Image (tube, rainbow, N blue to C red):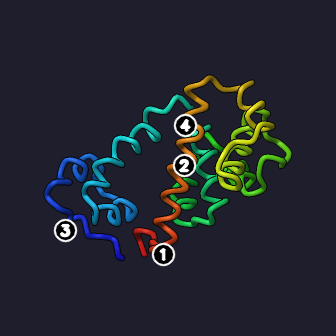
Amino acid sequence: MKPLPPDHWPQELAEIRSFLGKPLNIHNIMAHHPELMKAWSPFRNHVVGNSSLSPRQRELLILRTACNCQAEYEWKHHVERGLQAGLKSSEIERVKLGPGAKGWQAQEAALLSAADDCHNGYCITKKTLKAINRHFNTQQQLDITVTVGMYITLALIIKTYDLPMEDA
């Protein structure tokens, strides 16, 4: 499956297409399934725009998930977004080393551990959850799990269809 050029999107996706501006290839792949795209769009908007997590926290989760899933497409997109969210280049590189790398605050290490747990065992372990409970309220805890889950789902699409970067 190849990304659907934006001018070939089904008419029923016109509102979403307009909202996105110039869609990314992940959007262009999903445009093959209008009902999926219409269901996914509000969820995506919550995770990237209305989450109870800070942009920095969200980007740490996304970058670690992209790293864990070896989703280079997602990694490349979120390096820039991570910088915009206040992460330093050195911190973004440190994400690759995981939660045990020196320099993370306890809250950040807990986020990275949660991403690792979700990837490795499809749940946050009791040990990590104890740390998460110290730093995050219930809404944030749910946003942690759905953020990782959403980006694992995107990684499945990206890797299954060997999604190219937009400039490729």
Q: Residue at x 64, y 50 (%)?
A: 122
The three-letter code of the residue at mark 3 reads His
Query: Mark 3 or mark 2, which is nearer to you?
Result: 2
The three-letter code of the residue at mark 1 reads Asp
Contact between marks 2 and 1 (CB within 8 A): the answer is no
The three-letter code of the residue at mark 2 reads Gly
To which quarter of the image does residue 141 belong? top right
Q: Position of residue 130 (x, y in %)?
A: 77, 30
| In-image side of 134 versus 65 (left or right) | right
Secondary structure type for disc 3? helix
How much space separates mark 2 and mark 1, taking CA atoms?
20 Å
Q: Residue at x 20, y 54 (%)?
A: 13
| In-image side of 33 versus 46 (left or right) | left
User: What mark, if any, has residue 162 been given in the picture?
Assistant: 1
Contact between marks 1 and 3 (CB within 8 A): the answer is no
How much space separates mark 3 and mark 4, taking CA atoms?
33 Å
Where 6 falls versus 49 (above or below)? below
Which callout, 2 or 1, points at the residue further toward the start of the chain? 2
Q: Which residue is mark 2?
A: 149
The three-letter code of the residue at mark 4 reads Pro
Where 98 falls versus 143 (above or below)? below
Q: Which residue is mark 4?
A: 55
- The N terminus: image quadrant: bottom left
